[in-house]
Amino acid sequence: MKGFILSFRSEFYKSRKTAGFWSAVILPLLLCLLIFAGFYSRSDKMVMEPGMMLWVQFSGAILGVMGSLLLPMLIVFIGYSVNSIEHKADTWKTLFSLPISKFAVYSAKYFYAMFLVFLCLALFVLFTVGFGNLLGTVKPGLKFHDYNMSGVLSQLYFKLFLSSLGILSIQFLLRVLFRDFLKPMGIGFVATITGVILVANQWTYDYLFPYSHPMLALSALPQHHNHAAGSNPISVDIFTREIYISLIIAAVVFVAGYFIVLKKSVK
């Protein structure tokens, strides 16, 4: 455990000034700020909307963009960033020669990448709630303060996080296998577009394709519009079938990646 903590801390110090780390922080701020500006500019058209509907529209605009395209691309970039130093300096063998268990070194890199994804999504919850309440303050006519969305958003983004783990494991492994950025990026981009097409066309087995999972995880969100005008609370079913598939893929690829990296470290 001590070796894992040391390795995890090392990953933080190596990446804290990189674009991969700061993209996980800046992306939520920029996207939420843009949606805030859009709602602010047309606030006069929404003064008659109930608080729940306002929150669904505001958070749904952010979740829709994040879940369909930005999250998979962010994961591709994070997978590249976490492993880029070892590839550039060709230090995989040196890294595994340290007096720390090889599994601790490998798992620390993987869980640090997972931490960056979790950090990004947690900041989305924070900024969405913050900017929504700010809208309700600067535009008193908007009834954001009539409904508390923080609990629902936390569940939605946690589900989105779980749905991303299969993609993260695959992109992490691809970055270990390929030194350049273009191959993992190209595979990730094509797979993401494929996932969007499969979900959009409602393919029966789209839940088996990991790059479809973020969109499927949020597929129930549009149904909330039916409840927003009433008094029924929004409910979130977190552990749906695509989440289980995502977790299985993440575990299998994580273990397979460990043995591939072990072989790579002794070349």
Image: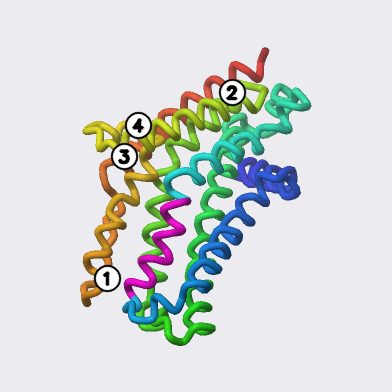
**Residue stretch rendered in magenta on the structure:** 52-65
User: Does label 3 or label 4 sit earlier along the sequence?
Assistant: 3
Residue corresponding to mark 1: 228
Residue corresponding to mark 2: 183
Q: For numbered disc 4, what is the local secondary structure?
A: loop
| Residue closer to the observer: 267 or 16 | 16
Distance between mark 2 and mark 3 Cα atoms? 26 Å
Distance between mark 1 and mark 4 Cα atoms? 31 Å
Mark 4 crowdedness (10 Å alpha carbons): few <14, some 14-19, many ≥20: many
Name the residue type under label 4: Phe
Q: For numbered disc 1, what is the local secondary structure?
A: helix
Name the residue type under label 1: Ala
Residue corresponding to mark 4: 209
Name the residue type under label 3: Ala
Q: Residue 200 — which label?
A: 3
Give coordinates of residue 158: x percent, y percent: 41, 55
Most common SS among magenta residues: helix
User: Does label 2 or label 4 sit earlier along the sequence?
Assistant: 2
Give coordinates of residue 5: x percent, y percent: 63, 46
Distance between mark 1 and mark 3 Cα atoms? 24 Å
Q: Is residue 57 above or below residue 207?
A: below
User: Does label 2 or label 3 sit earlier along the sequence?
Assistant: 2
Name the residue type under label 2: Lys
